[in-house]
Amino acid sequence: MRLVFLGPPGAGKGTLAVRLAEHFSLAHIATGDLLRRNVQEGTELGKKAQSFLERGALVPDDLVIAMVKERFRKPDAKKGFILDGFPRTVAQAEALDQVLSQMNSLLGCVAYFETSIGTIIDRLSGRWTCTQCGMSFHVRNIPPKRKGICDRCGSKLVQREDDKEETVHRRLEVYEQETAPLIKYYEKRNLLKKTSGDRPLEEQFEFLKNLCLESVA
Ligand code: AMP
């Protein structure tokens, strides 16, 4: 299975991608998590990406594409993957098409999380994220078992800097300008499957599980 999760920040892509990747033993490739790890570790890529993340702007395509290509070389990606937060521009989508054709493989489907602004603001303002594994929680909808501690790896949870209100508005503008055109891009290729990002977690999980099972590649 090779899937893309497409949608605005706060649509629930990351939470569902973690759970479905675990369920189907797929690699979960989240470019936001990979970039944040690079920033934390102070790598060359992290130094170049940091100011873009802080401003809620997109990291330049060439850096992100190189990072994803590198990630595809790891053995777990060969068995299938969920791409979460990539592609985010048409140039990234074209690069993905190229990489997949070099690997002799195809995308199974692109799940588009159509999400209302109310849900987005509520999810992002209540989101707590693990500093180590990237798992997301929500103060009301998905509270961690122990306050401030990740259920999965026991590390500290923090509120992401870019989930603050001013940066969220910037990220939504960037989404509309740069990423929303991908809806048409994948519609034209008959790969787009819509789901409502407003659905409750369990209902969304069941819906996407079936989508994964139905997807051809
Ligand atoms: P996310 O965790 O997916 O919300 O991403 C957080 C931030 O990482 C974004 O606001 C961008 O600054 C950066 N980022 C993540 N994925 C990409 C991508 N595919 N292209 C460019 N920038 C990205």
Image (cartoon, rainbow, N blue to C red):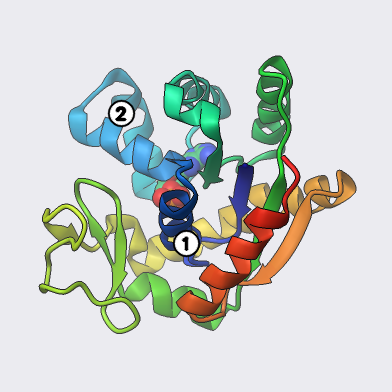
Residue at position x 73%, y 28% from top? 97
The residue depicted at 27 percent of the width and 57 percent of the height is 161
Q: Is any part of residue 56 visible from this angle?
A: no
35 to 22, vertically: above or below: above
- Decide if ligand 1 comes within 8 Å of the CB at mark 2: no
Please identify the quarter of the rendering in which residue 145 is found: bottom left
Mark 2 or mark 1: whose residue is earlier in sequence: 1
Lateral position of residue 156 relative to residue 138, left or right: left
User: In this picture, is 140 found above or below 165?
Assistant: below
Inspect the image, locate mark 2, and give the three-letter code of the amino acid beneath it.
Gly
Given the image, on which type of amino acid does mark 1 rest? Leu
Residues under numbered marks 2 and 1 in contact, where contact means CB atoms less than 8 Å apart: no
Query: In the displayed structure, does residue 156 sit left or right of residue 210?
Result: left
Horizontal and vertical percent position of residue 201: 47, 75
Nearer the observer, 151 or 25 = 25
- Kind of element beneath mark 1: helix
